[in-house]
Image (cartoon, coloured by chain):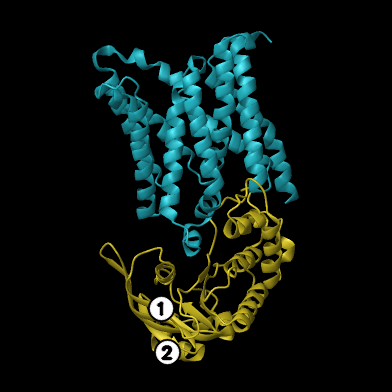
Chain colours: A yellow, B cyan
Amino acid sequence: MKCFKIEDLSVKMGKNVIIKNINLHIHNGEITALIGPNGAGKSTLFKALIGDIPYSGKFIYHNSLNPKKPRIGYVPQKMELEPSSPISVLDLFSTSITRIPVWLTYTKKSRLAVRRFLGMVKAEHLAEKRLGDLSGGELQRVLLALALNPLPDLLLLDEPFSAVDQSDLEGFYSLVQNLVKEYDFAAIIVSHDLSSAAKYAGTMIFLNHSVQSIGTPEQVFADDKFCQTFPQGIRAEV
Amino acid sequence: MEWTQYLFMRNAFLAILLVTPIFALLGTMVVNNRMAFFSDSLGHSAFTGIALGVVMGLRDPLISMIAFAGLIGISFCIIKKLTRFPADTIIGVFSATSIALGVVILSRGGGFSKYSGFLIGDILSITSLEIVTLSLVFVLVLLYWFFFFNNLFLVNINSVLAKSRGIKVLLTEIIFVVLLAIIVMVSIQWIGILVINALLILPAAAARNLALNMHSYNLLAVVISLLAGIIGLILSYYWGTAAGATIVLCNTVFFLVSIPTRVRLRQTA
């Protein structure tokens, strides 16, 4: 039995409370969609779970078979780079998985790993491309492949705003859904596309500084607080 | 060749072989991380570093220069971490203040001209002992570049991603800027405050126009930096010009030549 528990988690920046009293159970083998308006604290919650910013409260991992510190895979929304940067997909992978510096050489190990992990997200053909030449959807797949190596216990995925087209996005969600089932890990996706999220997420969390509503997507969409924040319903751009 | 007869030219040549690759390597990350303005102000902080050395009565102000530049670098990392946005204005304030403070102290009683040599530098003044020091710094940078490059690279492209992979983000950045402070301060007396930043920025900027990945980016930057350094030194001998500035101009030529390739790469992409 594996699951994540977040108990009474709050993040303050100076005097501002960004998120407060978050209590959640995150289950393995399904996608948990995290939704909420701009500035609701979704990215802040991710940063807290990664340990990039301090928080109060608890973040607990239960794993009866193998008690250990959980591995967290993170797919950022975007990369801090100019389109002309001389950075290839192979650079990104080699940097993350070997200690041999990429300026010196690319090891056979990292070349093999790149192919294997890109294969998991059906993107083998992207290995030698520059990051700046990838489309939004391709970059997202590459970053997902990186987060899968080593296999995470919890995947945190910050979906990009627009760069990905609708059929790409559905393909991506279904890919993540297959991965969480096949490798049995938990995944939280910050989702900006409510209709895709509704289709693939088992649980939905509506966050606006604190948890406003939680349940199946249908339950959340029927909640009063959701309807007040998003009067246009699931077609809302969030 | 005529210039090889002189010991000062042979020393200067050795110094160029050591300094230019270091600047090229560190420069690739300075450019990647959009730190050009920061490294410029790091160079300018030498004014205050020298002044502090003079006030404290040090014979060689190098220690106070490195200490002050290191302090500026560490403050920069911490401020960036706390505010999470490019600290252009803060860097500008730091830079202007450290120039002004240094000039005020050094010009007391009208004695600034004594220090004007630092502005353009003099690589021909390098001694054999200084070349030994330089070799140590060279080894230090190579070791850092070997063991920390991958982490530093990941921190640069996404610090939260780096954190999620267990990298000590702040520490990695601090070691990088301290190393940058050391090499810039050690070299400033030979290259000159006015042009030293160009040695960091130009080889990387030219290599960036030609490279498709980090391996070729670093390699090209080193080759360009070495070539420009050697050609610039020899030209400065025959022209009777300041070596630092001549080397920078050679780098500029490489940069200009690299631009059409960048345009072509972009069109095929």
* Mark 2 or mark 1: whose residue is earlier in sequence: 1
Give me the residue at 63% from left, 64% from top.
A142
Q: How many labels does the image show?
A: 2
* Chain for disc number 1: A
Give me the residue at 63% from left, 51% from top.
A87
Residue B246 on image: x %, y %: 57, 19
Q: Which of marks 2 and 1 is in front?
A: 1
Can residue B246 be seen?
yes
Q: Dot 2 lies on which element?
A: loop
Q: Mark 1 points at which residue?
A: A207
Q: Mark 2 points at which residue?
A: A223
Query: How many other residues sit within 10 Å of disc 2, few (<14), some (14-19) or many (≥20)?
Result: some
Q: Dot 1 lies on which element?
A: strand
In this rendering, position of residue B87 left or right of residue B240: left
Question: Front-most of A95 and A18?
Answer: A95
Can residue B85 be seen?
no
The Cα–Cα distance between marks 2 and 1, rounded to whole angstroms, is 13 Å
In this rendering, position of residue A113 left or right of residue B6: right
Kind of residue indicated by mark 1: Leu
